[in-house]
Amino acid sequence: MSSPKATKSVVSKLGLKPLNTQTLLYYYVPFQGVLSYTALSINVMNPSLVLRVFPRKDITNILLMNTLLGSGLYLYDRSHLRTLSQKERILYSAFGAVTFSLGSVLIWAILRSVIPKNIPLCTICGLGTSLAMIKIGSGYAKHLDTLVKET
């Protein structure tokens, strides 16, 4: 049986955080949202590929809901929103999550209509744009956080 210290060492080596309410809501759910967001990009750019994996069910809405939840909780916990009332934090984080997610779906739909109907190319474009938009969006949120004076 492994010791708690050894388990902690493995967890930290993997870059994971200890499981508690805070990390569940503001680390693991947003991470799951990133996974859903990248899967959503493939689903929009290359629906036939996703249908091969899930032939009996359209998972678009599930992926979108997980993306919205993950990105909304990510934004809700940012320091640039912490001085606001809970109502405003919920409103702004929900707005950011919906705008980011549905804006991305629109971008992918437009991209899909202009690039050649090539399965690998569509998949690569979906993954590439999703990773780029995650990087840009998280960089923007981190920049906003730097503008806040911690008290």
Image (cartoon, rainbow, N blue to C red):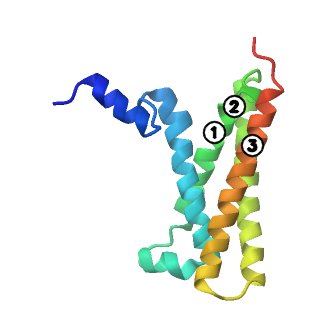
> Please, what secondary structure does the residue beneath circle 3 have?
helix
> Please, what secondary structure does the residue beneath circle 1 have?
helix
Q: Find residue 133 and report its image quarter.
A: bottom right
- Mark 2–mark 3 Cα distance, whole angstroms, equals 12 Å
Disc 2 designates what residue?
78
Q: How many marks?
A: 3
Q: Find residue 16 and report its image quarter.
A: top left
- Mark 1–mark 3 Cα distance, whole angstroms, equals 12 Å
Mark 2 or 3: the one toward you: 3
> Please, what secondary structure does the residue beneath circle 2 have?
loop
At a point 62% along the width and 66% down the height, the residue shown is 127
At a point 74% along the width and 48% down the height, the residue shown is 137
One can see residue 91 in this view: yes
Furthest residue in direction top, as rendered: 151
Query: For this rendering, which residue is in front, 51 or 57?
Result: 51
One can see residue 66 in this view: no
* Mark 3 Cα shell of 10 Å, populated few (<14), some (14-19), many (≥20): few
Looking at the picture, how far across and down is residue 113, in whole percent? Answer: 75, 82
* Mark 2 Cα shell of 10 Å, populated few (<14), some (14-19), many (≥20): some
Looking at the picture, how far across and down is residue 95, in whole percent? Answer: 75, 45
Q: Find residue 105 and report its image quarter.
A: bottom right
Disc 1 designates what residue?
74
The reply to whether dot 2 and dot 1 touch (C-beta < 8 Å) is yes
The reply to whether dot 2 and dot 3 touch (C-beta < 8 Å) is no
Disc 3 designates what residue?
139
At a point 15% along the width and 30% down the height, the residue shown is 1
- Mark 2–mark 1 Cα distance, whole angstroms, equals 7 Å
